[in-house]
Image (cartoon, rainbow, N blue to C red):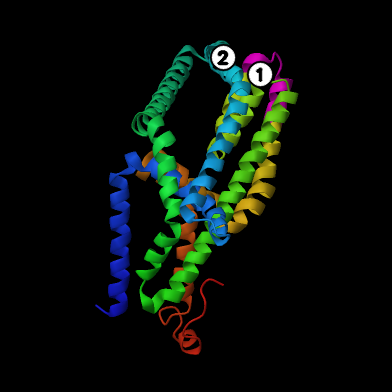
Amino acid sequence: MTPRLYRVAFWLGVAVAALFLLGQVQAILLPFAAGFVIAYILAPAVSRLEQGGIRRSLGSLGVLAIFLLAVAFVLVLLVPLIQGQVVQLIGKVPSLVSALQDHVGRWMAFLQERLPADEVDKVRDAIGSKLGEAVTWIASLFQGVITSSIAILNIFSLVVVTPIVTFFLLRDWEVLVALIDSQLPRRSLDTLRALALVISETLGGFIRGQALICLILATYYGITLTLAGLDSSFALGVLIGILAIIPIVGVTTGFVLALGLAASQYGTWTEVFVVVGIFVFGQLVEANILTPKLVGDRIHLHPLWVIFALFAGGTLFGFVGVLLAVPAAAVIGVLVRFALGRYRHSALYDPQEAERAPWLNPLE
């Protein structure tokens, strides 16, 4: 085995081992993953305070305290506003189920008038089996969410452990970065530093862009659904904004809930189509303006890869994997583009190109 192949095999082995270990401890990852994300966002502010002469430990404590107070302030303002609407939304679930049953009953009566009895029985059996499968899937989904993100990763871990993890990461951020830098292969130091810079810029752009998209979507759907006269519209808008952290999932969940509420609340199809139009317009703006400008230009991921990343992350690491799927896919995208750049300027791709330019920057 040549030295180059040996290095490739070594780093592949390290990556596989890391993924295996993460899979083994996925049940306790959420507070640590949340702490890392918060520390990554707050680290520049702590560094600025340190440059101003404030000790890093004191600066870390101060920045973290301000962040936690801001989160608490937002919760204090929002919880009373949406509490009543959330209760009202939950209370409407039985009526939504009843409305669905009525619609199915009317359709079955319509089919009985126009189809033979045996064909109607086949349709009824097919609908019953599919509804049973859907209910089973939803029940298993909620059971998985409850057991993974509430029972195991409970309130204590999120409220207590996450701030502690964040503080230590903020305090030792520069030390950890220097330690990692000191362990990098000296031969590839400049290349790895360049890769780390691109990954950092990609993740920073994704976090800032996705946070802005969540805020815009929450505001848009909260206002427009309120103007449309939909009950629990403010709570629904906030829910969509929060779930928009996970691309596609937030708006899809909000659309299903809003459609069910509209179908049970309004007496005509006109208002239902208004709600559908609100979501269609919102999705067109998000897909063609917000996401490409605020996120897409930074992560360079096709929507199909985003969907694949969400499914893969959920399968491998559960709830935490879904939350981190898109950032992880963005990092993998940077590494893949880097590898393809090296491949295109190697003898394996074009021997003559490799002789003319032994190495060109693959990040360009």
Tag 2: residue type?
A: Lys
Q: Quadrant of the N terminus?
A: bottom left
What residue is at 59 percent from the left and 15 percent from the top? 88
Observer-nearest of 106 and 141: 141
Region rendered in magenta = 263-277
Q: Residues within 10 Å of mark 2 (few under 14, many from 20)?
A: some
Q: Residues within 10 Å of mark 1 (few under 14, many from 20)?
A: some
Q: What is the quadrant of the C terminus in the image?
A: bottom right
* Residue 356 in the image, given as x and y percentages of width and height: 50, 89
Q: Is residue 351 left or right of residue 277?
A: left
Percent across and percent down for residue 188 are 40, 76
| Residue 231 - label | 1
Tally the marks.
2
Which of the pair 289/65 is nearer the observer? Answer: 65
Q: Which residue is mark 2?
A: 92
**Residue found 53% across the figure and 56% down from its top:** 54
Is the residue 238 above or below the residue 91 in the image? below
Q: CA distance from mark 2 to mark 1?
A: 10 Å
What kind of residue is marked 1?
Asp
Q: Residue at x 70, y 32 (%)?
A: 278
Q: SS of the residue at dot 1?
A: loop
Instruction: From this view, report whether residue 186 is shown above or below residue 248.
Output: below
Q: Is residue 301 visible?
A: no
Between disc 2 and disc 1, whose residue precedes?
A: 2
The answer to the question of whether label 2 and label 1 lie on touching residues, with beta carbons closer than 8 A, is yes
Q: Residue 126: name its quadrant.
A: top left
Q: Position of residue 21 (x, y in %)?
A: 28, 50
Most frequent secondary structure within the magenta stretch: helix
SS of the residue at dot 2?
A: loop
Q: Residue at x 47, y 58 (%)?
A: 331
Question: In this rendering, would 166 be left or right of 251?
Answer: left
Residue in front for this viewpoint, 111 or 233: 233
